[in-house]
Amino acid sequence: MSGEFEGRVALVAGGARGVGAACALALAESGADVALLDAPAGLATPAYPVAGAAELEASAAAVRATGRSALPIACDVRDRAAVRTAIERTGPIDLVVLAAGLRTPVALGEMSDTQWDETVDTTLNGGFNVLRELIPAMIDGDGGRIVLVLGDEGRRGAPLLSHQAAAAWGAIGLAKSVAVETADAGIAVNVVCTTELDTPAFDTPASWAQAARADGAGAEDAAHALRVRHPRSEAFVPLERVVETVLFLLGRPGEAMTGSVVDISNGLSALNSV
Amino acid sequence: MGMLDEQVAFITGGARGQGRSHALALAREGADIAICDIAAPIASVPYPLADADDLAETKRQVEELGRRCFATVADVRSTAEVEAAVAGAVAELGHLDIVLANAGICGFGPFAEISDEMWDDMIGTDLTGVFKTLRATVPHLVERGSGRIVATSSMGGKMGNPNLAHYVAAKWGVIGLVKTLALEVADKGVTVNAVCPATVDTEMVHNDALYGLFAPDLENPTKADVEPRYTAMNPVPEPWTPVEEISAAILYLVSPAARMVSGTTLDVCMGASARMP
């Protein structure tokens, strides 16, 4: 099978489930070999089960089923030594998708150090940790394509998600700075921001209450509130739309496009001032 | 009669620079002032930070204006130190009305050469330090049903800047944090905003390390060497923004005139925002 990404090697952080797993599979279907980083260790704050070794292996099996090779690595992006070791195993990478993230809603005044740290360390510091290991070889080699997948919390304020908003806004600043620094090196760094996804991270009473802006809200209350909030009257962004956009940004059209943010928001971005 | 009579302001990074200027500006309007500062060096920061003498000097100048001043050493990276500083301020001055999360550091390096220590000190101070300051103070404002919070971001919080990835990431993060807290306390009488200065005329930028950032082609660039380069960056042809201009923006955001202004950013940037979408 030939595809747009034939002969390329991709790395997907957060590749065991959700957007990461869907991107990994789509990349493989387009010809790329894929390294998958996931199965974080020791996270105390998520109220949902984070992806473990079995899910990581299942995502790798889906990649292999396309005929491409997969390298699943249990790696918490917060752990710099583990990230370094992982990237020593993968070798040079052409395409990067950073999709690791948490969702642990809590009011700022009640947020623990651990809640702040786990979210900021995963989304912001985790992105830094991975990119710092990969960028030098990309600069010395043939360049590369990098896409950060972040929440819409990176585009506005999101009550009860101040850690996630701070981390996502910070990650956009990081992406834009790296984009400027590497613009002459054949590297493109872009960001996709999505509104709510129907994934396990959203499937908690705290996330329902956050989305519905009401304590004790259920899943349907949350979905209703999301339909009301979004101009397209849809609660969730389909994973397929995110995957298509990530693959677009990883492809050749990315050559003249770096430092950009693409919103997939069921129309919410139409309400942005810029 | 001052605009801020009877009010108490808590200011991080108050030993010198913008923090001192804000302390004096608010004191002139009648506010009592609590300041904290790390008052010590951070190894990864390539210029001298404020010291205990600077902290004492701000306190002296506030008191010279006839206002009370509580000054203490606190590293905003430390939950315990921030909470102790806030508790001390409330014990000494009675309550809090205004919070200025101003403490910040700068440093630079090509992205792949940013060390763990540089990254952690920067995110810890310029982003997590703002979080810890707001977390420790916001209950005091909510309890009173009124309050003003201003965090110091930067024009670096609105664009990419080469060789400042850690600083830029932190300053973008501050804006996301501010917008979120603004929504959380919108019905509590508390406003939360950010001020985004361009390069301000303080010790943070007047040092060999930062001069080198803007004149990498010169071996030992001086202030005179870099001045025209800074000027060239700004539509308003000035090299550096005076601290008083940032304090004026802060005074507006804490004034009665700004009671309907929350979740926004105020650029004080010599026209640079006119070039942005």
Image (cartoon, coloured by chain):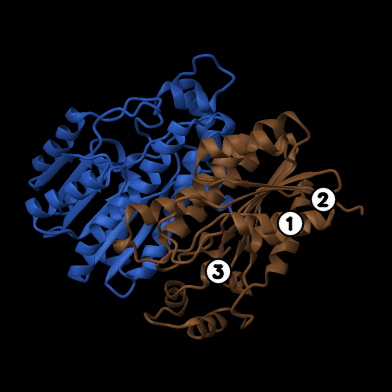
Asked if the residue at tag 1 contacts the one at tag 3, i.e. Cβ–Cβ closer than 8 Å, the answer is no
Residue type, label 3? Pro
The brown one among the chains is A
Q: Nearer the viewer, residue A2 or B188?
A: A2
Q: Nearer the viewer, residue A37 or A139?
A: A37
Q: Distance from label 2 to label 3 (Cα)? A: 27 Å
Q: Residue at x 16, y 49 (%)?
A: B33
Rendered position, B50 above or below A170: above
Label 3 neighbour load within 10 Å: few <14, some 14-19, many 20+: some
Mark with earlier residue (2, 1): 1
- Foreground label between 3 and 1: 1
Mark with earlier residue (2, 3): 2
Q: Position of residue B12 (x, y in %)?
A: 26, 45
Asked if the residue at tag 3 contacts the one at tag 2, i.e. Cβ–Cβ closer than 8 Å, the answer is no
Rendered position, B164 above or below A42: above
Q: Position of residue B126 (x, y in %)?
A: 38, 43
The residue beneath circle 1 is: A61
The residue beneath circle 3 is: A200
Q: Position of residue B49 (x, y in %)?
A: 30, 29
Q: In the rendered view, does A234 fall on the left or right side of B220?
A: right
Mark with earlier residue (3, 1): 1
Q: Quadrant of residue B6?
A: bottom left
Residue type, label 2? Arg
Label 2 neighbour load within 10 Å: few <14, some 14-19, many 20+: many
Q: In the rendered view, does B81 fall on the left or right side of B207?
A: left
